[in-house]
Image (cartoon, rainbow, N blue to C red):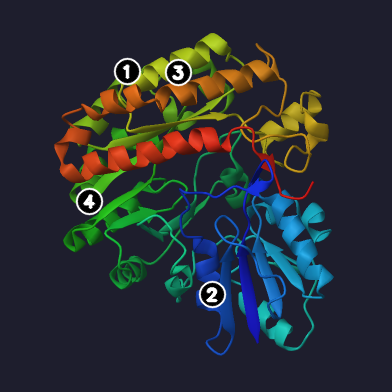
Amino acid sequence: MRITFIKPNIGRKGHSLYVDEGRMEPLPLGVLAGLTPDDIQVTLYDDRMESIPFDEPTDLAAITVETYTARRAYEISAEYKKRHVPVIMGGMHATLLPQEVRLHCDSILTHDAENCWQQVINDLGKNNLKSVYKGYPGIPHPRKFPRRDIYKGKGYLPLSLIQFGRGCRFQCSYCVTSVYFNSKQYVRDIDAVLEEIDQQDKKLIFFVDDNLVSDRKAAKELFRAIIPLKIKWVSQASIDMTEDEELVQLMADSGCLGNVIGFESINPKNLEAMNKSQNNSANFNTYDFQLKILKQHGFQTWAAFTLGHEYDDADSIKRTCDFALKNRFTFAAFNILMPYPNTPLYRSLKKQNRLLYENRWWLHPDYRFNHATFKPKLMTPDELTAACFAARSRFNSFGSIMRRAFDSRVALSSLFRLAIHFKYNKLFQKETFKKQDMHLGFDE
């Protein structure tokens, strides 16, 4: 028996598939491959960099679906269905919109796949796949490790993706994670994480947790355990970690280079409206205290901003970029606020009749990547799109990359950090222009 795992692309530029040069290992598919019995042949095709051989014999096409890749995923599924190959779809989008996804496959798997994948395998062997498999949120891939051999030769970035926990305790109104995990976090046994780290062969680890420090006690136990390993790692963490001196010191001692941090906005009113409680410190409109702590420990910060909230206009977006440049963040993402399906933000905008593209931007043929999908309060959708692109272009300019490198506490503190600064800033600079205005999906 053979199972083909598929990682869909976002879409195309003109008439060519977009090749993602910043692609990372698709960890969820590696996890499922690891849970698949050894007597079943598994193959991975990554649509972000290679063609899918639809005529290659297989017994099941397993496609992971995200909101941005839904249109392309449905196209891939249609090709397999033409060849009478059964298709199962899972992933975040399948859980958020199961009724939609079910229209495009034979079988759907919602929530975490680990707790029902064996049932899928058993039913496949009996040629009796169910139309729906319902997993439940839980501890990431217990008892089994991802199969990393399926990543070989696909040109992924030189870092290993490992997961300690899933979910986050916060309830930000725009966040898909809080909906998916119901504002809870599930963490793995630390010994299993240590064993997985020992098995991989990369010099840099990316803990792909939604918020690595959501459970501070568990995070501290992890950091203490990995100190002897002398690894280098990055992750995603909320800014409130700076309130806990012991936590931050343990992060530094265990090899943390930095984190993706959701600043989202420098406007207190926006933060309050989006229920970003973890950013609500006494000086959260300047972040002075938090940034001082991060600099003291030499952390390279990837500042993530979402733009287009109720109190945003073109001038406030420019000031947000000014803030990022002033603080010499190693990286920064200026993302248009996106109403993901079934989030509180989506429901609110739909109720106010402010959604564009017939309420389903991820499937609409006129939608383009990095464009606004709703009517902002203080500007037009086109003005929001233009302001965010201008911020990305300005922050990722050659002059900005050079100026931000001259920070003795961060980029200049080691050759390794300096190399990361230039390597990844150059990549993000290129991707800024490659992705803008891209079609979702491939078929006309």
Q: Amino acid at mark 2?
A: Ala
As drawn, the label of residue 255 is 4
Q: Is residue 132 left or right of residue 420?
A: right
Q: Is residue 53 above or below residue 268?
A: below
Q: Secondary structure at mark 2?
A: helix
Q: Earlier in the sequence, mark 4 or mark 3?
A: 4
Q: Earlier in the sequence, mark 3 or mark 2?
A: 2
Residue 247's x, y, as percent? 26, 44
Residue tagged 2: 33
Residue tagged 1: 326
Q: Is residue 410 visible?
A: no
Q: Is residue 291 visible?
A: yes
Q: CA distance from mark 2 to mark 4?
A: 29 Å
Residue 356's x, y, as percent? 77, 28
Give the residue displayed 79% in from the left and 83% down from the top: 128
Q: Earlier in the sequence, mark 2 or mark 4?
A: 2
Of residues 370 and 103, which is closer to you in this image?
A: 370
Comparing labels 2 and 4, the label whose residue is closer to the camera = 2
Q: Is residue 48 left or right of residue 252?
A: right
Comparing labels 4 and 1, the label whose residue is closer to the camera = 1
Q: CA distance from mark 1 to mark 3?
A: 10 Å
